């Protein structure tokens, strides 16, 4: 009998009013034993109303109270991370070690949020004019919406929710309907940690739920992570409704390998960053720009390492799991045909993989395609799967130019032992997150995550200092406490002095 995944509203599981559901698959088995409810606009209204009712008390709560909840949540999550990792593997398909890594990166943001009493401090300037002081306050927005993607069902909610609630906001979270259980698991854990009912609510759903959040008059901001077309839609719709929006979009991340690079390190890094989580990462390396003089050797080294990878059920000792759905698996696999038709060389074909898993799983093995033309959709599209493309370049300048002409600007990397080349690259490349001999340059929690160009809509990145600013509004207060010596009436324009 199928299990139905409910919403989480005002501290309790609820079925809501909608009768629509959608199956949730185990991608390693190709079977489904769960359904998830798809919220109606009325269900979103209920969640927002719960968040709105909880906001005044949570806004007015002390820093000590909020930090106590977050600290307890951190301890509970750290103690039970294995349970959550198994949940992620069952619904997403990523291997257990990768799921645990996702949770660890989410925990970093929880720990960052524990410093919120310091991070959200205002400034104070005494005697800016005679007897006048000016100071600033940072205050919460109110009810905020978070829309998270399927590829990181725990980490991405943890990028936003801890900072939002630490600063005094209340949250309505809409997770991906493809792997929704992790968000409810996290919401239950927050409740166990002492978070008041209604501060964090979870509504499952599809476009109807997203649109309801985007236009709801009581939702003050939207945080989104997903593909570029949807990120653009979220940004335009949300801002048109008067909301703050941070919408993180897609990527086509390049890794430039110069002739002086350590080719063994570069090959290891290309495999790790290209095929981890089956390539379903916005920070995956999907294009290796190999300088022609070392391209043959690098491709050979990458292929050698790929031969040792095992694809299979993430609950077993495998290196890479399945793709999230059969439809996505088939779409990614279709690019291998495109590559051949466009004149590229398929060095390793993942369609022939023999998985360590059920025959009906959504399998596609690691794939390596060499000599990819820049006009091929294999290069231009965000494939979001285990397809690693090699584009051969004459040198640094051509590689940099290719990266800078891409419509995406999420992450990039350069592999070199030349400090001057690395320093020049970090100054000249038009990308938001840069790795130097580091293939997946995801910033630690006390910096901020986000790209340039069509990889980020809005001016604010995720977590870190920019996350604190996104979830708060500043007030500037100018005060004078009068004494008997004040100057009386003066109709002139106020000025310092």
Image (spheres, grey):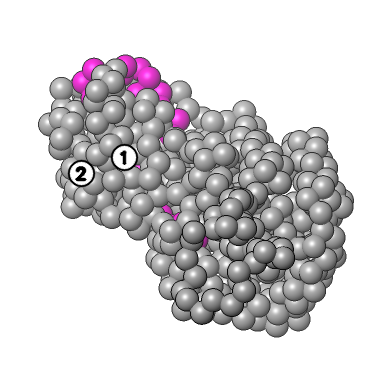
Q: Which residue is mark 1?
A: 254
Q: Position of residue 378 (x, y in %)?
A: 28, 50
Side (left or right) of 369 relative to 22: left
Q: Is residue 132 above or below residue 143?
A: above
**Callout 1: helix, strand or loop?**
strand
Residue drawn at (72%, 59%), measured in percent from left and top?
A: 168
Residue drawn at (60%, 63%), measured in percent from left and top?
A: 478
Which circle marks residue 402 in the picture?
2
Quote the CA–CA distance across marks 2 and 1.
9 Å
Q: Nearer the viewer, residue 226 or 88?
A: 226
Give the quadrant of residue 95: top right
Q: Nearer the viewer, residue 409 or 120?
A: 120
Label 2 crowd (10 A; few <14 / some 14-19 / many >=20): some
Which circle marks residue 10 in the picture?
none
Asked if residue 48 shows in the view, the reply is: yes
Q: Is residue 106 magenta?
A: no
Q: Nearer the viewer, residue 77 or 113?
A: 113
Asked if residue 185 shows in the view, the reply is: no
Q: Is the residue under label 1 in contact with that under label 2 (CB below 8 Å)? A: yes
Residue drawn at (40%, 49%), measured in percent from left and top?
A: 451
State the extent of the magenta-drawn residues as a range. 246-273
Q: Position of residue 120 (x, y in %)?
A: 64, 50
Residue drawn at (31%, 30%), measured in percent from left and top?
A: 414
Work out which quarter of the rendered image holds the N terminus and state it.
bottom right
Side (left or right) of 86 relative to 432: right
Q: Is residue 220 above or below residue 413?
A: below
Total number of numbered labels?
2
Q: Is residue 254 magenta?
A: yes
Q: Is residue 300 above or below residue 339?
A: above
């Amino acid at each position: 009998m199928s299990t139905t995944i409910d919403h989480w509203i005002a501290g309790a599981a609820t079925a809501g009013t909608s009768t629509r559901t959608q199956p949730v698959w185990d991608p390693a088995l190709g079977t489904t034993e769960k359904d998830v409810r798809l919220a109606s606009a009325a269900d979103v209204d209920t969640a927002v109303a719960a968040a709105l009712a909880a906001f005044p008390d949570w806004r007015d709560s002390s820093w000590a109270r909020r930090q106590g909840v977050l600290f307890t949540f951190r301890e509970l999550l750290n103690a039970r991370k294995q349970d959550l990792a198994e949940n992620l593997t069952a619904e997403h398909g990523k291997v257990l070690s990768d799921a645990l890594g996702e949770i660890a990166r989410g925990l970093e943001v929880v720990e960052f949020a524990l410093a919120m009493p310091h991070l959200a401090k205002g400034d104070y300037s005494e005697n800016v004019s005679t007897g006048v002081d000016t100071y600033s306050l940072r205050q919460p927005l109110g009810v905020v919406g978070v829309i998270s993607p399927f590829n990181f069902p725990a980490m991405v909610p943890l990028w936003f929710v801890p900072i939002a609630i630490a600063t005094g906001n209340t949250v309505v979270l809409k997770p991906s309907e493809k792997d929704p259980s992790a968000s409810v698991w996290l919401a239950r854990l927050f409740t166990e940690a002492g978070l008041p009912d209604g501060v964090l609510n979870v509504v499952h759903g599809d476009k109807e739920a997203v649109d309801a959040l985007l236009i709801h008059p009581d939702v003050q901001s939207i945080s989104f992570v997903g593909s570029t077309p949807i990120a653009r839609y979220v940004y335009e719709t949300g801002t048109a409704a008067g909301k703050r929006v941070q919408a993180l979009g897609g990527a086509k991340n390049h890794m430039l390998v110069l002739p002086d690079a350590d080719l063994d390190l570069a090959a290891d890094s290309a495999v790790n960053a290209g095929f981890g989580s089956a390539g379903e990462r916005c920070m995956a390396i999907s294009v290796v720009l190999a300088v022609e003089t070392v391209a043959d050797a690098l491709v050979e080294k990458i292929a050698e390492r790929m031969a040792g990878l095992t694809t299979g059920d993430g609950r077993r000792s495998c290196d890479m799991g399945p793709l999230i759905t059969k439809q996505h698996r088939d779409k990614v696999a279709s690019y291998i045909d495109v590559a051949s038709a466009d004149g590229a060389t398929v060095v390793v074909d993942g369609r022939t993989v023999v998985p360590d898993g059920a025959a009906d799983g959504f399998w596609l093995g690691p794939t390596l395609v060499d000599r990819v033309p820049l006009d091929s959709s294999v290069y231009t599209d965000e494939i979001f799967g285990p397809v690693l493309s090699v584009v051969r370049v004459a040198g640094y300048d051509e590689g940099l130019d290719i990266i800078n002409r891409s419509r995406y600007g999420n992450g990039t990397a350069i592999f070199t032992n030349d400090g001057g080349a690395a320093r020049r690259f970090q100054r000249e490349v038009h990308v938001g997150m840069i790795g130097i001999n580091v293939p997946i340059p995801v910033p630690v929690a006390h910096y901020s995550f986000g790209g340039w160009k069509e990889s980020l809509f809005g001016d604010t990145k995720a977590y870190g200092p920019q996350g604190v600013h996104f979830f708060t509004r500043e007030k500037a207060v100018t005060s004078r406490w009068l004494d008997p010596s004040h100057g009386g009436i003066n109709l002139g324009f106020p000025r310092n002095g």
